[in-house]
Amino acid sequence: MERIIVCLKPVPDPKQWDEVSMDPETQTLIREGIASVINPLDKHAIEAALSIQGVLGGEVVLLSMAPPSAASTLREGLAMGADRAVLLSDRMFAGSDTLATAHVLAAGCRWLGDNDLIICGNMSIDGSTAQVGSQLAELLDLPNIMHVIDLDLGEDGSMVVTRKIEHGFARLRGALPLVISVRKELNKPRYTSFTGILAAESKEIKVLSNEDLKISPEVIGIDGSPTKMAGIELRRFERAREKLDGSVDEIVESLAGRIYQYGII
Amino acid sequence: MSGDMNGIWVFAEQRGGELHEVSLELLGKARELADEAGKKVTAILLGHDIRSLSQLLLNHGADSVLVGDDPRLKTYRLIPYARVMASLVHTYDPEILLMGATYMGVELAPRVAAKVRTGLSAHCIDLRLGEKGQLLQVVPGWGGGVIATIACPDHRPQMATVMPGIMKALSAIEREDTVKEIEIDLPEKGLGPEVLEVKREKPDQLPLEKAEVVVAGGWGIGSQEDWKMIESLAELFGGSVGATRPPVDEGWAEEGQMIGQSGKTVRPKLYIGIGISGVMHHVVGMDQSEHIITINSDPDAEIFDTSDVIVVEDFRKVVPKLIDEIRARLKK
Ligand SMILES: Cc1cc2nc3c(=O)[nH]c(=O)nc-3n(C[C@H](O)[C@H](O)[C@H](O)COP(=O)(O)OP(=O)(O)OC[C@H]3O[C@@H](n4cnc5c(N)ncnc54)[C@H](O)[C@@H]3O)c2cc1C
Ligand SMILES: Nc1ncnc2c1ncn2[C@@H]1O[C@H](COP(=O)(O)O)[C@@H](O)[C@H]1O
């Protein structure tokens, strides 16, 4: 095994999501003051990479497309035990949709050289599209498998993967190089040790811009993204909220009455 | 011929010869959009020995079906499926392509979109037509707290995935047969991982998305013991049991019973929510239900904003009596 890449997305801390508000004029979300964390599933991706590395060797590289401030989030991933990180950061990348993001990540993978395995989280919690893994694989012309809940690597470079399907699972065998997207059932991410945090301080985070990657502006950023935001609004919920009053017996009586009215019983 | 097949496409998902429900739901939506835009609906059916499913697709709203029947497509494999879909798109140039946000669709749709270099929006909750035939794709973001509308103005097809249970299938009408077989052209090698085994179990309860009644419980139920009350109530209606995240974490309910942003989307005729606070993450999965009744001891519970009928009480006082009352009425 030469190299395993983990695609790591820094996301706004879900604990602070209720602090998100919207600027009515610009129709954009205000997320100032909200800390970034590693996308939860990407920790499972890091764990998978580290445990494979434990058996087959090679280096584990974290790859992220994000603003320069994401370096601190990458540092957390390095503290878990990854060897180095590459941060793809350029104004030109801003506003990328999933396809444009995949173009940038693909360029990052190519910049790194030959990669045996690329591991993504199945889905990010902010974008929640679950699209980047498959699109990255397509752009790199590599096979990919999503919804991974178990995996076994053979010495011969083949990999047996269990993936979830409706009411069951499928087992597949693929040859490396391969892109996989993992679910949380796969493993339990290790805790970061104090020595891990210290070691991470001296690990490299290489920052690359589009001067290094030279991706055509036509496929990246807002202008290069095929999907466009046509509107955004805060969701409102409004229903009658008719309160049933009285003794418990009376309430039960009216509840059963409603259920009858609805044609259920 | 291709003139009739460049309108709205629905990927008809089948596994083991069984059509996924979401395909018929998508056909229902596609029919509505097509009638509005004066276009035709085409269903794309891939597999082996699956021709008999075409009639079902026609009866549920497709004007025509493109069938790719080949032993190599018998079991779903991403690379061959993506190749065939992309080559069909290149040949027929459809305006719109809809797929289910199923385990298969979530993996396949982005790969196809990247192959044909077009836009794709995930987990849409609504689809509308905008100016110049644009497909407006409504998606929840940020845990469902915001609703974004996405368009794909300059690339075709406009692609979207939709969660099962959101669109309504049309009732079947016997329709005329326009089925076209397509040639499957695949290389010998480079088809990606081989499938060793597929294992599926019959789900023991009615799938949540299909249940007419969903009784959902939250953290407020408090114990495995009391969770049985939720199950008994659901059983009386022949309905299904749903849950918020905490009961799943506690092990009272299964992962597949979770409703909300990271779980299922349901729109039953009746949703009864018990001991649920009504955090957005959960509400986005149930707020399209026809009738919503909720029971919560906290008079300020947020769930009430999404409720038609509310009961401010300890559920332990109400639910056992409700079970008796319903049982008595059913006996009559
Ligand atoms: C990224 C992300 C994704 C998530 N996705 C989902 C998702 O898909 N689905 C989901 O459900 N959650 C999801 N969650 C979790 C979600 O944020 C909430 O934590 C969860 O929905 C709360 O569940 P609850 O209402 O059961 O619990 P609580 O918020 O603890 O509410 C319990 C309620 O029970 C009431 N209660 C207590 N005792 C009684 C009694 N005796 N009688 C009547 N009422 C009583 C209380 O008043 C309270 O309102 C997600 C969270 C994150 C961060
Ligand atoms: N900007 C990004 N940088 C690095 N990895 C990403 C980025 N966006 C998405 N990913 C990867 O793709 C997975 C799925 O993300 P998404 O398609 O946004 O749901 C994530 O879990 C990451 O592994």
Image: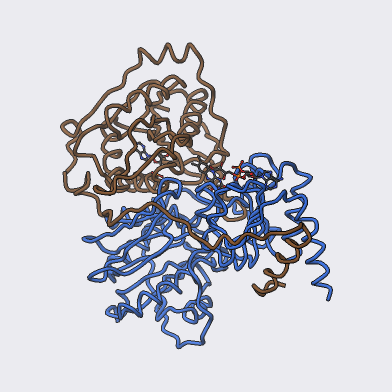
Chain colours: A brown, B blue
Task: Tell me what residue is drawn at x 16 percent, y 43 percent.
Answer: A216
Res B149 → quadrant: bottom left
Q: How many marks?
A: 0
In front here: A103 or A117?
Answer: A103
Residue B215, given in percent of the width and then of the height, sits at 67, 58
Task: Tell me what residue is drawn at x 27 percent, y 57 percent.
Answer: A230
In front here: B42 or A191?
Answer: A191
Tell me the quadrant of the picture where the C terminus of chain A can be found. bottom right
Say above or below: B330 vs B126.
Answer: below
In front here: B6 or A2?
Answer: B6
Residue A20, given in percent of the width and then of the height, sits at 38, 40
Residue A203, given in percent of the width and then of the height, sits at 35, 16
Tell me the quadrant of the picture where the N terminus of chain A can be found. top left
Res B318 → quadrant: bottom right
Res A63 → quadrant: top left
Q: Quadrant of ligand 1?
A: top right
Task: Tell me what residue is drawn at x 31 percent, y 69 percent.
Answer: B129
In front here: A74 or B307?
Answer: B307
Is residue A153 among the parts visible in the rendering?
yes
Question: Would you say A10 lies left or right of B329 here?
Answer: left
Is residue A157 among the parts visible in the rendering?
no
Say above or below: B18 vs B279.
Answer: below
Residue A2, given in percent of the width and then of the height, sits at 39, 27
Say above or below: B91 vs A176.
Answer: below
Say above or below: B77 vs A136.
Answer: below
